[in-house]
Each structure stands twice: as C-alpha cells, then as structure tokens.
Image (cartoon, rainbow, N blue to C red):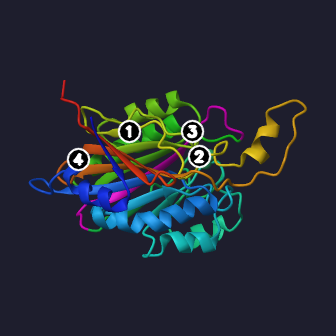
Amino acid sequence: MSILVCKGNDAFFEALPSALLPQEPEGIIRVLMLGDVIGRPGRKIVKSLLPQLKHRAKINIATVNGENLAGGFGITQKIFNELTAPATGVDIISMGNHWCDKPEVHAIRKASNRIVLPQNLKNLEGVELIPEFEIPGSRRTLCVVNLMGIFAMKHEYNDPFAFLEKARPVLEAKVQGGQSIVVVDVHAEASSEKQAIAWFMDGVAAGLIGTHTHTPTSDERVTRKGTAFLTDVGMTGPYESVIGMTLDGSMPRYFTPKQKKPQEVSEKDVWLCGFLLEISEKSGLTRAAHRIQYREDAEEWTLRTVTAQRPS
Ligand SMILES: [Fe+2]
Ligand SMILES: [Fe+2]
C-alpha cells in the first residue's frame, strides 16, 4: 500500500502519473467508479473534477452510482443529460433502492442503455440483462453488474446470489476469452453481503464497489486472482450531514419525540470518493487499484494504492 496526499489540484495532477502503472508491456485499462453522487453538491464536484481527472489519469471509462442525483432521490432526464454530456464525462450510471423515486427513470431507460438498473429488481422486464459497453482504447467491452443487497432493505429483490450463480459462468467465459471486463456495483447495507459477492466474483470481476451506506470503508484490496474490491466507496457529496442530508432535517428523527422534518441535501464539507482500477488488457483482471478521495474544504487529494496480492 502506498499513499499520495496532495494539497490542491495542480500538485495532485502533477504527482498522479508516478502513482499509476506504465501502459507497457500488457496494456492498462483504467476504469473509475464513483459511489452515490448526492444532489446538487455532488453533481457540482463531479462536474468540476471528473473531466480533469479523466484526462490526467488517462481513464478509459467512468461509472457513477446515480440513485441520489436529484435532491437525494432518484434521477431526472435533465440531470442524466448533464452528467453524461462529454464535457462532464460520466459514461455509465448505475442505480440502487432509490432508482424509481422520479418516474422519469423509465423514459431515460427506454432512450439510453447508459443507465443500469439493479439486475435483481423484481417484475421489471429486461432488467436482468447485463449491459456491455465499448471501452474507448480497448478491444474489450465493459460488462456492468448492478445488484441490490437484501439485508435491511425496505423493498424485496430477487436473490443476488442466485442471479450470480447463473451469470458468473457467462461472464467468466467473456473475461477469459478476451472479450470483456466485468465490474460490479453492489448496492447494499451489510458489509458481509458485499464481501460475499466480491469473493464469489473473485477472478471474474476486475473490480467491485459497494454503495448505499454513503460512508467509505478502508478495506480496498486486490485479491490474488486480480479482483479489486472496496466494501463501500462512500458518497460523493456533503459529509457535514447524516448520509448526505442536513443536520437540521436529520437529527430530530433520532430523538424522542421523533420528528419527521423535511429532508434536504446538505451543502457542507463536500468530498469526491472513487475507486480507480488499473486492469490488464491481457487478462481482463486488475493489477492495481486506488481509493481516491478529494475533500473540497481542505483542497486535499488522497490516493491510496493497493496492488495484487502474491498468488498463494
Ligand atoms: Fe445512496
Ligand atoms: Fe441506496
């Protein structure tokens, strides 16, 4: 593990290339995955930093979890267009339990495959198909798996493990055949569920992030088989909050008598949190991964790098 800490964008982007793998000899594909982007402050920091980050780190393709983009609840067409515009640079938006808080999601999904809904949603036609995207600069495609966990969720979902038992052999053949790279966004409350899914996909998925808790964990790793995982990548949004929402709106919910005040997205102490995978074009699996955080108030970037564990 190595850590790069820099004050300000200039220092970070200058130091960044030294923390990345060389392109040669096997070809490196860089995939950036951001967790739940929260409301306007989350969108703003993505728009201000992603284009430069993509350019300077030579990132081939970027995903975000978009279930909280519209005021914390769901996604609108306007926001989808804004984020996926080339000037912003989001390539794919995965979702979570707030996927249908705004009904526009159905029209967005009809018009574009760049929004990926959890494949274990119940009773939604075609949702179980794992989409495959071209990766600029690579011969391989990117298969994006998005799954809901089932522990402590308000709604019911199909069993994510049963889904993967069927999908895994197909994905494995695509990775081993040189056709695809697989990444997974597990949207779940329980670390145990996310870790179990990561181990089940070990050696097939190049990378897996957890989302939904809005709180980053510090357990990033690359397994012996080349699967990078981080139990929760954390939200890209305001951290002076309770999981993104203002203290004024949130705190009265916890004390007696309990008050349900309107929930509003906080604007204070915004961070960008992501997981950057460096994937071998040859194997379709990960050689190095970086947990990236930027804290706006401190203007501080942190990049924590882990490389593949030695094969046992
Ligand atoms: Fe979320
Ligand atoms: Fe969620």
Quadrant holding the N terminus: top left
Marks 2 and 3, Cα distance to the nearest angstrom?
20 Å
Q: Nearer the viewer, residue 259 or 97?
A: 259
- Chain-order first, disc 2 or disc 3: 3
The amino acid pointed to by label 3 is Ala
Taking 57 as reference, is 76 above or below it?
Answer: below
Sequence-wise, the earlier of marks 1 and 2 is 1
Identified by mark 2, the residue type is Tyr
Disc 1: which residue: 229
* Residue type of the residue flagged with mark 4: Gln
Q: Is residue 195 above or below residue 12?
A: above
What residue span does the magenta drawing correspond to?
A: 137-154
Question: Is disc 2 in contact with disc 4, using a CB cutoff of under 8 Å?
Answer: no
Q: Which residue is mark 3?
A: 188
Q: Please tell me whether mark 1 or mark 2 is closer to you in this view.
A: 2
Between the C-alphas of marks 2 and 4, the distance is: 40 Å
Viewer-nearest residue: 258 or 153: 258
How far apart marks 1 and 2 lie (CA) works out to 23 Å
Mark 4 = which residue? 176
Check residue 239 in the rendering and tell me which mark sits there, or answer none.
2
x, y (%) of residue 143?
38, 55
